Image (cartoon, helix red, strand yellow):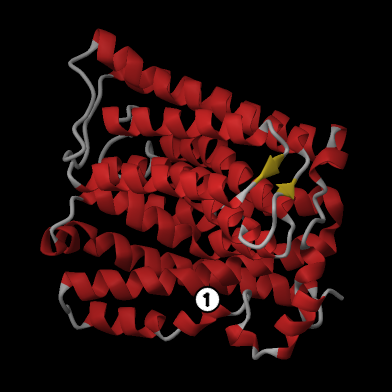
Amino acid sequence: MSTDTAQETDRPYLLTGEGWPYLLVPFIPVAVVLELNHAGATWVFLASALGVIPTAALMGRATEELAARSGPGIGGVLNVTFGNAPELIIALFALGAGLHEVVKASLVGSILGNILLVMGASMLAGGAKRDRQDFEPRAASAQALLLLLATVALIMPAIFELVQGPGLPSPRDQAVAYPSDVLALSVGVAIILLLSYGAGLLFSLKTHAHLFNPAQGEDDHGGEPWTVRRSVTMLAVAGVAVGVMSEILVGSITEASASIGLSPFFVGVIVVAIVGNAAEHWVSVYFALRNKIDISINIAVGSAAQIALFVAPVLVLASFAVGPFPMALVFNGFEIGAIFLAVFIAQEVTQRGDSTWFEGLQLLAVYAVLGLTFFFV
């Protein structure tokens, strides 16, 4: 056991890198009580946003424990399937409320957050006391290339609408109903992305599993491993809790953003995206601090790729059954520009095989500039 791990296990669980999200558990009943008593939307939003974090952390822990018991193949599928479940659940409730542009903003925000915020914070934290950190570039580059290809597919409906239709949506829009040809194109893109996602699973879990090491990091959990029954129970409890918090969060977004003075677009692309990924974000930084930057980069880039290849197309297909009308994959100009910049940065960073704290700082600076731009939208 390393010195870092030994020091971590000597501390109270709630003060460890893995246990801190559960300090926020009291915000779950607080959010419910505020909602039932029709409190101010701002307080409801803040309480439910904080309440999402421990529920997402519990879902992630239950998934990892269940994956560890299921073998590398099934375990890998469980990890990639449930890895972004909190964002998916939040987005489904937003779809039901007709907040299509908030949904698309949160998708873009999750990709930006993983590539710039998470990878940047990981490189900065991990490289602060080291000259540099080395990682295996092949797995990270494969994920980054997959993300680039997915991004090209994601923005084609927007280009189609820009050339053939009246133009892109405004960041201030709540939802836009698009004609049947744009919807058909969005569905076709969604199906192709899901097929690519399936091929990616085959690549990372079977034919080239040695590059991705699906069992990575599971030995860093302290305490006794969970049984399958406990893992499934906790996964179910976390799913219900995420659902409750998501419904409250989404119901307060529009009114709360107006009260705070922020646009729903900024709330979706920055706040909701960070909240839904907070526990996973910390895991990435946690491993970087322990000089396991390989895991950190694979978490960041892999999660961003999963958003583009799995979560986005699932939401497009689900919108035909959930919400007032189907959602087309037509992003606004700010989203398109930001996501392309982030993906090209990911391509450059993952090709070198090493990182420094200064590179991490630069990634965070880019994220700050984008956030500042979105603030004034």
Q: Is residue 7 left or right of residue 304?
A: right
**Residue 321, above or below 127:** above
In this rendering, is residue 247 above or below 5? above
Residue 8 is situated, as x and y percent measured from the top left of the image, at: 71, 81
Left or right side of 52 for 257? left
Residue 373 lies in what quarter of the image?
Answer: top left
* Quarter of the figure that contains the N terminus: bottom right
Is residue 277 at all visible to an observer of this figure?
yes
| Residue beneath disc 1 | 21
Residue drawn at x 44%, y 40% is: 315
Q: Residues within 10 Å of mark 1 (few under 14, many from 20)?
A: many
Quarter where residue 65 is shown? bottom right
274 or 128, nearer to the observer: 128
The image shows residue 320 at horizontal and vertical percentages of 38, 36
Relative placement, left or right, of 268 versus 377 is right
Q: Is residue 226 visible?
A: no
Residue 19, image x, y percentages: 60, 79
What residue occupies the far front of the structure in this picture?
131
Of 301 and 185, the residue lying toward us: 301
Q: Amino acid at mark 1?
A: Pro
Q: What's the residue at 45%, 26% (across, down)? A: 154
- Give 70 or 212, whichever is nearer the viewer: 212
